[in-house]
Image (cartoon, rainbow, N blue to C red):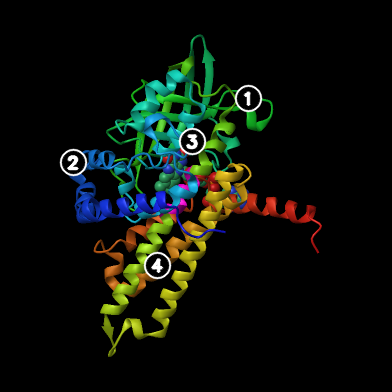
Amino acid sequence: MQFEHSDKVKNLLARLEAFMDEHIYPVEQAYYDFVHDQQNLWAEWPGMEPLKEKARAAGLWNLFLPHEYGAWSPGLTNLEYAPLAEVMGRVPWSSQVFNCSAPDTGNMEVLAKFGSPEQQELWLKPLLAGEIRSAYVMTEPQVASSDATNLELSIIPDGDEYVINGRKWWISNAMHPRCEIMIVMGKTFFEGPRHSQHSQILVPRDTPGVTVVRHLKVFGSSNSPGGEVELRFDNVRVPKQNMILGEGRGFEIAQGRLGPGRIHHCMRSIGQAQRALEWMARRADSRVAFGKKLADQSSVRQDVARSFCEVEMARLLTLKAADAMDRLGNKAARDLIAAIKVVAPSMAQQVADRAIQVHGGMGVSEDGPMAYFFTLNRYVRLTDGPEEVHMSQLGKIKIAEYVASNAR
Ligand SMILES: Cc1cc2nc3c(=O)[nH]c(=O)nc-3n(C[C@H](O)[C@H](O)[C@H](O)COP(=O)(O)OP(=O)(O)OC[C@H]3O[C@@H](n4cnc5c(N)ncnc54)[C@H](O)[C@@H]3O)c2cc1C
């Protein structure tokens, strides 16, 4: 067992951390000031494109893409990417600077793995170049979408086209001014095995019949410029070539997409927890109450100690899951992926909560990152499947495994 990063990763980490110090932390608040200003709703922060240029020039681009993809990918494994994603997670918006942000990363992996050469030319290339952005369109208001076999939006063949009808909601990024393509999951077959009825199809964002019904705020925030929205699809027509992989193969694609996507979220959550912990320690050292530093109060030390233990446990579990994905494949690693999806966001929410408490009133303000980390990780506990669903699957796998084993 090797707990040291390779020289390649150490080198990338040093360059990424230097980039964060020089270009990201100094403008962190300016970014939030811009996107929280209602006058700038759905507008891109003007600093984003220049920063992307710098990141690309620095070779800090598409780090997430785990396997070599032409000149676009540095070809890192999941294990190698994990500490880099953690550093980006410290400032959640920064992953876009490095073209490593959700949902684009998952969508790029879908197109790289399952897209036709024509789909790759049209949509993957501009996504890898960071020229456009994308949305992943799965959840529906009228059905429990954590069970994706429930999805009802219809994708029906008609001549050279597919016709799409239905409703979706909680679609991130759909309002982003650069969002040009959406991967939409829906039903093509209405009988037969439940996991062979759904398909995934590419729908350009500006296709006639795609309407934004409303914008959904998250804990009162617009999440501008990407936003979360409810969408209607009324007789939306796209050419047959837009079908990904083939009719009825939606679940195959979903499995391929969600493994890496889930672990990337966890890596970033760990970065947020680590940063909240560092803020908590510094505040405890600088604040005096009732004649002594907060750092000298036993309960505060326990909060720091417990948070350290939890961050370390989650980080090691994430690295173990990443390593299993690299060596055994996403399917064989599904127990560890489920485990980390259950552990990391709730851990980060808990650590952010302790950091808020140690900061007193300042903790819930915008003068520190803790309040945002708290709300962000609260909803990451729902996205890409609520934690109960992962626990249910994990429990099933482990029961079967231990029942089958002869260990005494
Ligand atoms: C900020 C945000 C961004 C999002 N972005 C996107 C996006 O870009 N694209 C997209 O398609 N979706 C997105 N979502 C939607 C998200 O993926 C879904 O909300 C999630 O998958 C749950 O589906 P649901 O809301 O239909 O909940 P439901 O399926 O109705 O589940 C509700 C609750 O039931 C419980 N439950 C469900 N199954 C079980 C079980 N087996 N055992 C025990 N309890 C269970 C859980 O507590 C669960 O939270 C986003 C959501 C949020 C909040």
What residue is shown with label 2?
46
Q: Main secondary structure of the magenta part?
A: helix
Looking at the image, which residue is at 48% across and 18% down?
A: 163
Q: Nearer the viewer, residue 70 or 292?
A: 70
User: Based on the displayed image, in which of its 4 quarters is residue 370 positioned?
Assistant: bottom left
Q: Could you tell which of marks 4 and 1 lies nearer the N-terminus? A: 1
Q: Which residues are magenta?
A: 261-268
Q: Can residue 235 be seen in the rendering of this structure? A: no
Side of 315 where 10 appears, left or right: left
User: Based on the displayed image, in which of its 4 quarters is residue 398 positioned?
Assistant: bottom right
Q: Could you tell which of marks 3 and 1 lies nearer the N-terminus? A: 3
Q: Nearer the viewer, residue 195 or 210?
A: 195
Please state the total of marks drawn on the protein image.
4
Q: CA distance from mark 1 to mark 2?
A: 46 Å
Q: Amino acid at mark 4?
A: Asp
Residue 116 vertical position relative to residue 256 in the rendered view, above or below: above
What residue is shown with label 1?
190
Residue 138, image x, y percentages: 49, 35
Q: Amino acid at mark 1?
A: Phe
User: Based on the displayed image, in which of its 4 quarters is residue 299 positioned?
Assistant: bottom left
Q: Quadrant of the N terminus?
A: bottom right
Residue 353 numbered mark, or none: 4
Side of 253 where 50 appears, left or right: left
Disc 3, ligand 1: is the CB inside 8 Å?
Answer: yes
Residue 138 numbered mark, or none: 3
Q: Amino acid at mark 3?
A: Met
